Amino acid sequence: MNVALPEISRSMLKNSLVLGLFAVATVGVVSLVQLGTAKQIARAERAAQVRTLAEILPPGSYDNQLLDNRISVNDPLLLGSKRTQSAYLALKDGRPSALILPATAPDGYGGVIHLLVGIRADGQLAGVRALSHKETPGLGDKIELAKSPWIHSFEGKSLDNPGEEGWAVKKDHGQFDQFAGATITPRAVVKAVHKALQYFDAHKNQLLGSAEKQP
């Protein structure tokens, strides 16, 4: 019995070493896969962001990489969020042509509605898109371009067009359509877009002047 013990110990040691090497190899393979997958996910997310931003500004209105020209913004009252967020500065021939602002409507029917608001340097709206929401399917979700062209109604508008009283849905004597059976959602979006314009107007020089600080 005593003679067999060293052999058993050597066998156990050998098996332990094999298992240890297998575990190390497995961890290495998993790490490489995760690293490659993470890079693919990051590229896919960036491509999705680029597509979303490109939908807001018309083609040819800028010639820079929007994701590489970010500005930190924070205004709970006018932008609707307590968090510091990123705005995207559009340049054309090195000059500011537009800005895409994040805007949050906290008072949607289903909760918070997150928007992107594109504003040209002259203060006119270039486009608005709903990023995320929990509005009622078939009713409030008409703020999505895929469900309705309603979101296009903001294009070309500004603080002076239609003016203070016009920045409301028609049920509230404003100029923007509401949805049949759903007024709360468009009302919240109209208010949020109007506030984003007010923020831009109040900080225009600072926001557009940041182009001189871009690398």
Image (cartoon, rainbow, N blue to C red):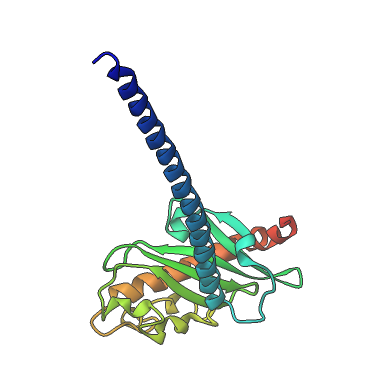
The relative height of residue 18 versus residue 162 in the rendered view (above or below) is above
| Residue 205 picture location, percent across and down | 67, 61
The quadrant the N terminus occupies is top left
Q: Residue at x 57, y 72 (%)?
A: 119
The quadrant the C terminus occupies is bottom right
Q: Is residue 206 left or right of residue 180?
A: right
Residue 160 falls in which quadrant of the image?
A: bottom right
Residue 145 falls in which quadrant of the image?
A: bottom left
Residue 170 falls in which quadrant of the image?
A: bottom left
| Residue 130 picture location, percent across and down | 42, 72
Q: Residue at x 76, y 73 (%)?
A: 93
* Nearer to us in this view, 174 or 1: 1
Q: Is residue 107 left or right of residue 167?
A: left
Residue 169, visible in the rendered structure:
yes
Residue 198, visible in the rendered structure:
no
Q: Residue furthest top?
A: 2
Q: Is residue 90 left or right of residue 215?
A: left
